[in-house]
Image: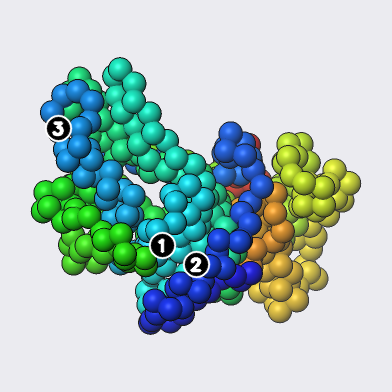
């Protein structure tokens, strides 16, 4: 499973899943960072949610109580809504290091992504009992990172809480449009999945759909439909409280990478060299701690100096009458390339350019080029503003936008 397995409008048969599970057991992780290194500063997104699922009798858990039943649902991945993520695994394999195939679904697309149970927590203290496990992504997954699923009982109140905490970033994708779609819709589905996970745990306990799986059943497909409404309906934070009773929810994304990609694309449409010049200056001042050969070229101090000179020259050239319009094909291509370079680099300075973010940055640059070209025309032809003055005003806006973007990523 050296590449991402995907299909349109259909999934995989039981025999196919068993074959892929066997391969997944030998796959390496698709990241190298230790858990304590997976921080925002090191380029990792942080997503967390938790909710009270039920209230049981005070004291430590006992057999067949609510904690024991929910623990069983946790072990069999019953919290995952199959409309978003469908879990496949062999229940006969020990939990530690067990391979699991997560079938991710979105808009008719199915992605079969391998993970491994990387750690187990089983703690009983005076005040609380904690049980759960962590999944680690493997090669062939569209995400990279670790995610904890923990069931916690407060001995004093009897409160049972479900806690999900993940550190992740983009992994492998089978094609550029999958990466672009993930950039645009990924967080929406992730948030919906978190909300539905808490709702499912509560519903599993309420309805009694927690029967034990027979030991002879090797291949497990977790599924219980809690609600048939569209997944997208639940993707707003406020609705998570209504659906899953989510009490605490946080998203600390990697410097809001999507908005930053668009922002630098817009800047490239205004002044083609300004976008990479601003970003290169920032990356050169605060280089990313990355393996040798993986740091982006914009982080070079030498490249930063060259780009600053080119950006300054462009501010002057923009006011000259013989310079081609920014929407002429050569100029438009240059601005699109600039937006692609800067947009992809700001999203992942520690990695090589990703096609999805590059396309997003290029699209923003092209749209910005036409928008500001039209504004410049209106200002000079309809309002009588001298071209020099209009150009200086646009320079000021570009510089203000560049500085604002540096504050966001700084």
The residue sitting at 46% across, 44% down in the picture is 134
Image quarter where the C terminus lies is: top right
The reply, left or right, for residue 242 in relation to residue 318 is: left
Q: Is residue 136 above or below residue 332?
A: above
- Residue 249 in the image, given as x and y percentages of width and height: 34, 40
Question: Is there any visible trace of residue 21 in the rendered image?
Answer: yes
The residue sitting at 62% across, 36% down in the picture is 37
Q: Counting residues from the N terminus, which is met first, the one under dot 3 or under dot 2?
A: 2
- Residue 20 in the image, given as x and y percentages of width and height: 51, 71
- Residue 165 in the image, given as x and y percentages of width and height: 42, 41
The reply, left or right, for residue 224 in relation to residue 315 is: left
How many C-alpha atoms fall within 10 Å of the one at disc 1: few (<14), some, or many (≥20)?
many
Image quarter where the N terminus lies is: bottom right
- Which of 233 and 392 lies nearest the eye of the viewer? 233
Picture quarter containing residue 325?
A: bottom right
> Circle 3 is placed at which residue position?
56
Q: Which mark is residue 90?
A: 1
How many C-alpha atoms fall within 10 Å of the one at disc 2: few (<14), some, or many (≥20)?
many
- Which of 12 and 10 lies nearest the eye of the viewer? 12
Q: Counting residues from the N terminus, which is met first, the one under dot 1 or under dot 2?
A: 2
The reply, left or right, for residue 236 in relation to residue 117 is: left
Between the C-alphas of marks 1 and 2, the distance is: 8 Å
Closer to the eye: label 1 or 3: 1
Q: Do the CB atoms of the residues marked 1 and 2 lie less than 8 Å apart?
A: yes
- Residue 336 in the image, given as x and y percentages of width and height: 67, 68
The reply, left or right, for residue 152 in relation to residue 36 is: left
Q: Which mark is residue 21?
A: 2
């Amino acid at each position: 499973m050296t590449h991402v397995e995907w299909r349109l409008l259909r999934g995989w048969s039981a025999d196919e899943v068993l074959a892929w599970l066997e391969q997944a057991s030998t796959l390496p992780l698709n990241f190298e960072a230790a858990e304590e290194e997976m921080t925002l500063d090191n380029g990792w997104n942080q997503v967390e949610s938790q909710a009270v699922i039920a209230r049981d009798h005070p004291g430590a858990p006992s057999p067949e109580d609510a904690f024991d039943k929910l623990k069983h649902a946790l072990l069999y991945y019953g919290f995952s809504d199959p409309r978003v993520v469908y879990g496949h695994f062999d229940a006969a394999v020990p939990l530690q290091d067990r391979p699991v195939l997560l079938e991710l679904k979105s808009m008719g697309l199915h992605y079969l992504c391998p993970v491994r149970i990387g750690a187990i927590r089983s703690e009983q203290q005076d005040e609380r009992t904690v049980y759960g496990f962590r999944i680690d992504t493997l090669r062939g997954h569209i995400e990279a990172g670790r995610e904890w699923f923990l069931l916690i009982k407060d001995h004093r109140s009897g409160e049972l809480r479900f806690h999900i905490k993940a550190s992740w970033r983009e992994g492998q994708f089978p094609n550029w449009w999958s990466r672009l779609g993930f950039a645009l819709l990924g967080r929406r589905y992730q948030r919906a999945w978190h909300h539905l996970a808490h709702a499912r745990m509560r519903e599993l306990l309420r309805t009694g759909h927690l029967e034990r799986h027979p030991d002879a059943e090797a291949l497990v497909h977790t599924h219980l439909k809690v609600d048939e409404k569209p997944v997208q309906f639940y993707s707003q934070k406020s609705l998570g409280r209504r659906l899953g009773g989510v009490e605490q929810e946080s998203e600390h994304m990697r410097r809001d990478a999507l908005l930053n990609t668009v922002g630098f694309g817009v800047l490239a449409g205004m002044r083609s060299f300004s976008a990479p010049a601003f970003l290169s200056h920032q990356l050169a001042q605060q280089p990313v701690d990355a393996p040798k050969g993986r740091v982006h070229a914009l982080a070079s101090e030498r490249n930063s100096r060259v780009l600053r000179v080119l950006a300054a020259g462009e501010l002057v050239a923009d006011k000259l009458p013989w310079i081609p319009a920014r929407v002429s094909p050569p100029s438009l291509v240059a601005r699109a390339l600039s937006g692609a370079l800067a947009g992809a680099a700001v999203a992942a300075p520690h990695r090589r350019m990703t096609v999805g973010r590059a396309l997003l940055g290029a699209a923003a640059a092209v749209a910005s080029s036409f928008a500001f070209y039209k504004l410049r025309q209106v200002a000079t032809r309809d309002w009588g503003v001298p071209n020099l003055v209009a150009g200086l005003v646009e320079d000021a806006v570009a510089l203000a936008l560049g500085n604002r973007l540096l504050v966001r990523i700084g």
